[in-house]
Each structure stands twice: as structure tokens, then as C-alpha cells.
Amino acid sequence: MNYALAIVLGLVAGVLAGMFGIGGGTLFVPTLILLGLSQHEAIGTSLLAIVPTVIVGTWRQSRYGNVRWRAAAVLGVVAAIAAQGGVALAEALPASTLRRLFAVLLVLVAIQIVLRGRTSAPSPDAE
Amino acid sequence: MRLVLIGLAAGFFSALLGVGGGVVIVPLLLLFCGFEARSATATSLAAIGITAVSGVIAYAIHGDVNVGYAALVGLPAASSVGFATALQQRLRTRTVELLFAGFMLAIAVWLFLK
């Protein structure tokens, strides 16, 4: 039953990624916790689960000409280096702290989705 | 320079919390770099791929990566993301946005109470 739910939440995460540019991790982490992984395992596993999603998402978006490659390369390389610091801190923090931080993040994401819908009107330019 | 700062913040929070970093990158690209919504989303996705691989390697060293479970949630997501990307080109559904926002809040409450 939980496996079926995991697959359904995976599908929903993909929709979220495609529509809002969020890699899907916001749903992967709670799903993996539901499946019984520890907070740290859920985080590490979520990052791996993100990879196929973003590869497909990037490929699709690039066909629409939406990707700015130079900016993406700068962001990606800098972020990859900074990620090492994030992992080091996560490994030093207790699971309960990480779980609460994650809950705060979800609230921020919810607010962001609502605000973005209000401020950015549908743009007809397909570039 | 702004891109470097955004990248630093995104990479750190991405790896700390196990999310892609798009949560950080997309609004900052919109606010500070003058990106249009779709190119911010798309550029963020491309950057996230590199970031996630870096985080995975570090977590794998600590034994915190479960490949089977990653496939269980990651492969369905990869199959639906293309569909959603196509959908995004055509419509902006306020209902879908509010549904997602509500869903996120529900999960946040669950995690707090857990």
C-alpha cells in the first residue's frame, strides 16, 4: 500500500517539478520518511531521486528554448560546491531539527506558489 | 556575481534539506536577475541536476543513499515531469497552484506533529 502511495506521490512530484521548477524533493523527502527511511537517509535518497526528474525536465524545457545555459552552469557549479557544506551541517544536526526545518521550508514553498500565481500574469511569449 | 550568491545559497540549502534548490533559485532569479518565469524555472532545473549529484556523492559516503527507494519515487516523477512541462506552456491554473500549496501545508503540519 505504501509502495503504491510512493509511486503516486512520485508522479505528483514530477508534475510539481515541471510546473513550478521545484525538483520534486519537497515531496520526495516526506514520501521517503513515510516509507520508513530515517531523516538523513530520506534527504540523501531524495537528492538521487531528483536526478532523473531534472534530466527529463531540463531536456523538455530546452526544447522550448527556456534554459539559459550559461546562467545554469554558473549556478550549478557554485551550488555543487556549496552543497558539500550543506551535507556536512546536515550530518551534524539531529533528525528532529532537520525535520522541523523541512516543515518550515514547505510552508515557504506553499506561500511562494500562491504569490507567484498572483504576481506573474500568464505570459503569452513562448520565446 | 548575483548568480554566484544565489548558487551558494541554493547549494547549501539543497543539500541540507534534500530538495533540489529550485525553491531558492527560482524566486531569486525572478526578483534579482530579471528572468521571466519560464526561463527561471527551466534554468533552475538545469542547475539543480549538477547540485543534486554533488549532494548524493557526499551522502553516499555517509551511507545515507538508498538506490531502490530513489528509483521508486524518482522514476514515476521523471515520467510525469514531461507532461507537466507541456502543460505549463499552455495554461496557468490557479486551482492547481492552490491545491499544491494546501498539500504542502498539510505535509508541514504532519512533519511538525510527527
Image (cartoon, rainbow, N blue to C red):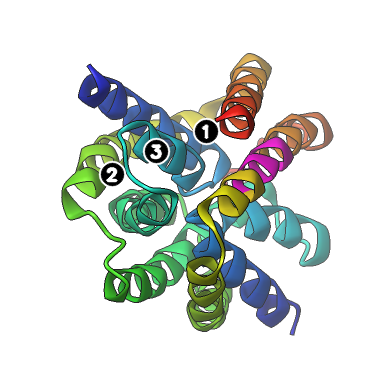
Q: Secondary structure at mark 2?
A: helix
Judging depth in this view, the residue of A102 and A108 nearest the camera is A102
Mainly helix, strand or loop, the magenta region? helix
Q: Secondary structure at mark 3?
A: helix
Q: Amino acid at mark 3?
A: Ile
Membership of A36 in magenta stretch: no
10 Å crowding of disc 2: few (<14), some (14-19), many (20+): many
Distance between the alpha carbons at the discs numbered 3 and 2: 15 Å
Q: Chain of mark 3?
A: A
Using residue B108 as the reference point, say whether residue A81 is left or right of it: left
Whether the residues at callouts 3 and 1 have beta carbons within 8 Å, the answer is: no
User: Is B59 located above or below residue A82 in the figure?
Assistant: above
Task: Give the residues in magenta.
Answer: A102-108
Q: Which residue is mark 3?
A: A33
Q: Quadrant of residue A37?
A: top left
Q: Which residue is mark 1?
A: B88
Q: Position of residue A62 (x, y in %)?
A: 41, 57
